[in-house]
Image: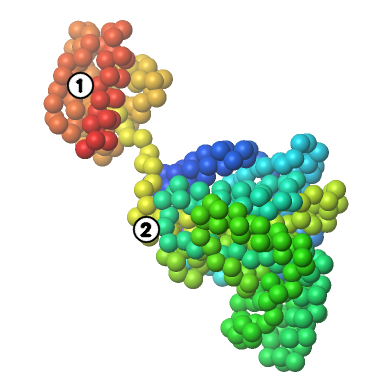
Amino acid sequence: MALNIKRPNGTEDVTPKNIYKWHTIEKIAKETAAGYGFKEIRIPTFENTELFQRSVGETTDVVQKEMYSVIAKETKFTLRPEGTAGTIRAMMQNGILNEAMPQKVYYILSCFRHERPQAGRLREFHQFGVEMAGSQLPSADADIILMANDIINNLGIKNVELKINSIGCPKCRAEYHKALKAFFEDKKDSLCETCHSRLEKNPMRILDCKSPVCSEIAQSAPLITDYLCPECREHFKKLKSYLDNLDIKYTVDPKIVRGLDYYTKTVFEFVSTDIGAQGTICGGGRYDGLIGQLGGQQTPALGFAMGLERLILTMENQGCRFEEDKNCMLYIAPMDESVTSFAMKLAKSLRDEGFWVEYDTVGRGLKSQMKYSDKLGAAFTMVLGDNEVNSGSAKLKNMKSGEEITISLDDTFIQKFSNIAVNEMFSEVFE
Ligand code: ATP
Ligand code: MG
């Protein structure tokens, strides 16, 4: 019977065959973040809708068109469309922001946005993200850009461009908004419907509009970098000098405004040139106003998020190395049921040592057990019958070389097998 219920559009299954790719990325990202003093935080999959309205922003695409919301028992909840809002909410609620600054956390989580599914754009996707609260200095901006850069390098990803910009603080933004309004006002009739209301409420959002006509018009719009106040200008200058000093290549792209409203000052993106139109593998920036906006004490903060599906796509396209899952080390083939208990004990003793060991649990005959062992790619097999159990020794066969040795099934077994297995692993590495 065929299953006629399929997974929803824009979602993906990760099967056991592919999970090693995810493990590779998660491990490298976690290890790199740990070196920068970041600890993991886990937050709920859904939050009160108001949290996203107030942080991501009422005039953003995410809030206006892309959120998955439900009313459950009269309360409105939304599946998180991104990780920052929930993380900051959790840091506030758990008193983390009252501790010694800076506070640094990372997360790996799924996000939900109702977008048009295509390569690198899903409705449920995954992010590795970090947030750092409590520093207003540009050295913090440099630190997290450096960390993102490290993760990308440690994954072996090449051909990535770092784009940075400063979108200023509310002070300089007010001036800039005026300039943008003046610029777009007489081109109003050509703008899309949504941009009409953006012009009133949040003209900077027009710069992020995906409609070809709007983005064409936006090409010649005034640039935020010309409207930065002295403090924001100095912050940006200092950040650039830190990046220069670290020898991190970047381009200043005054067109980057990012899709979420909470950003201030520094914003940045890492863009891969190898995975087509959805090339942004990492996006982030500073959001000094957000914590205050959510009712906390004004605390500067910043962060970034990487799209894990896009990282995997890039790594696949570039032939980057993923860490393979461990191999089956031993397949024990009991000749009949009478020795199954013995095989089980033997397997357990080796599993306790960290080896992947299998024995028959489906009642195959000896010949088809051997075929199955081959399929598993077991490094060694051992046939067990009454003879072996009674005599206390069995033949261990190296499946690659075909070589067989006799091994005692007594107290020395675990140590001997471990030595042989480790030798085999090394010989594979050096092949
Ligand atoms: P884009 O401009 O590509 O839509 P964004 O600005 O909406 O990205 P952010 O909200 O900054 O993205 O999220 C950070 C990262 O998450 C992105 O750089 C991207 O790698 C990934 N990402 C965002 N939306 C999706 C999606 N729908 N499917 C897969 N990955 C996504
Ligand atoms: Mg988007």
What SS does tag 1 mark?
Answer: strand
Give the CA distance from mark 2 to mark 1: 40 Å
Residue 41 position within the rendered picture, expressed as x and y whole percent measured from the top left: 66, 41
Residue type at numbered disc 2: Gln
Q: Nearer the viewer, residue 91 or 35?
A: 35
Colouring used for the render:
rainbow
What SS does tag 2 mark?
Answer: helix
Vertical position of residue 12 compared to residue 151: above or below: below
Vertical position of residue 169 compared to residue 342: above or below: below
Which picture quadrant has residue 191? bottom right
Q: Which residue is pictured at 79% across the width and 44% down the height?
A: 92
The residue that disc 1 covers is 396
Q: Can I make out residue 112 in this image?
A: no
Q: Which residue is pictured at 17% across the width and 15% down the height?
A: 406
Residue 141 position within the rendered picture, expressed as x and y whole percent measured from the top left: 65, 53
| Residue 318 circle label | 2
